[in-house]
Image: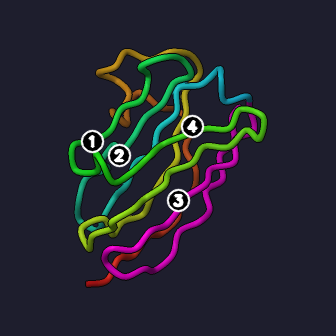
Amino acid sequence: QVQLVESGGGSVQAGGSLKLSCAVSAYTYSLSMAWFRQAPGKEREGVAGIYTGPGSIFYADSVKGRFTISQDNAKRTLYLQMNSLKPEDTAMYYCAAVLGWSYPGQMLESRRYNYWGQGTQVTVSS
């Protein structure tokens, strides 16, 4: 069983930055991990995914160049640095994990993941 606990959400004005953290109860190098978000009335959307190893970071087109996913294996923590935030980034953000490697096409698909955090709210005002 892998437990995930997100933190770092909050309210910010457009153009601002936030850094989300996800504390993981297992060693992150053994996991495929990702950040998802869900706005009211919308489907859950994969934002960024990561698996330890070269070329194993993926972003949704909507956040490329603005968001950066990273992980600290020693601290067992996943991060999402969000810059140049827009009102459309407003959503509940979730950390997700699954044991083992994932195909690139799976990294931003919610059905791939079987461990989820409780979410942290991000609100961006214009």
Q: Residue at x 68, y 43 (%)?
A: 77
Q: Residue at x 53, y 69 (%)?
A: 9
Q: Which residue is mark 2?
A: 47
Q: Which residue is mark 1?
A: 60
Instruction: State how far apart marks 3 and 1 are (Cα).
Output: 19 Å
Residues packed near mark 3 inside 10 Å, few (<14), some (14 to 19) or many (20 plus): many
Q: Is residue 95 magenta?
A: no
Q: Are marks 1 and 2 in contact (CB under 8 Å)?
A: yes
| N-terminal-most mark, 3 or 2 | 2
Instruction: State how far apart marks 1 and 4 are (Cα).
Output: 20 Å
In this picture, residue 93 sits left or right of residue 39: right
Region in magenta: 1-26
Q: Which residue is mark 4?
A: 115
Q: Position of residue 119 (x, y in %)?
A: 52, 59
Q: Residue at x 33, y 67 (%)?
A: 85
Amino acid type, callout 4: Tyr
